[in-house]
Amino acid sequence: MDDDELPADWERDERYDRLARRSDRDPTYEGYVHETGDVRLHVAMPDAESGEDGAYTIFLTLYPYTELSEQTEVRTVTTKARADEVVSTFAGLFVGACDGPADVEDAAQYALERTRPADVTDTSLLNDE
């Protein structure tokens, strides 16, 4: 994803790119960090160790690299374009809901609720008659 697809308060986390260059491999993760440093999104590529095999898994980390760090899965999608769209949407929703450091968790919850897939039930809509 290009930086211009992200809200101004977000930027690409270059750590993943540096790690890939050092190991002489293709990146298996892409990361994005909010300017506060308190919120990070990362996308596990299909061949990454974490996430679903053959899919792009988007993770949210609150307070990364601290004792308070919490990670949760946002969504799993099948294409890179869709992963970029979910990251961009999440970042935009987060920026719109966050008014400062005290709102980080509430803003993250707001964005999560709107980017996660809708609950699906196992109940058939057809009668079994």
Image (cartoon, rainbow, N blue to C red):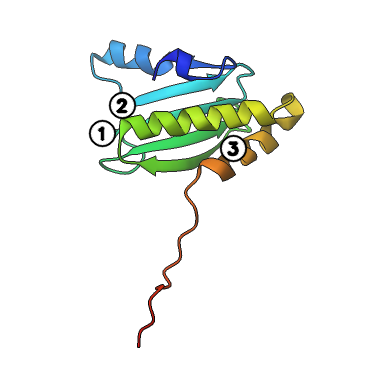
Q: Are marks 3 and 2 in contact (CB under 8 Å)?
A: no
Above or below, comparing residue 54 to residue 31 in the picture: below
Q: CA distance from mark 3 to mark 2?
A: 24 Å
Query: In the rendered structure, which disc, 3 or 2, sits on the residue that comes first in sequence?
Result: 2
**In the rendering, at what x and y percent does residue 47 appear?**
25, 34
Pick the residue in front: 39 or 90: 90
Query: Of tags 1 and 3, which is closer to the observer?
Result: 3
Q: Are marks 1 and 3 in contact (CB under 8 Å)?
A: no
Query: Of tags 3 and 2, which is closer to the observer?
Result: 3
Which mark is on residue 79?
none
Dot 2 crowding, Cα within 10 Å, few <14, some 14–19, many 20+: some
Instruction: Kindly identify which residue carries mark 2.
Output: 28
Q: Answer with left or right where residue 32 lies relative to residue 28.
A: right
Q: CA distance from mark 2 to mark 1?
A: 6 Å
Q: Amino acid at mark 1?
A: Asp
Question: Which of the image's four quarters has the C terminus?
Answer: bottom left
Query: In the rendered structure, which disc, 2 or 1, sits on the residue that comes first in sequence?
Result: 2
Above or below, comparing residue 108 to residue 1 in the picture: below
Instruction: Kindly identify which residue carries mark 3.
Output: 111
**In the rendering, at what x and y percent does residue 45 appear?**
31, 31
**In the rendering, at what x and y percent does residue 24 appear?**
23, 13
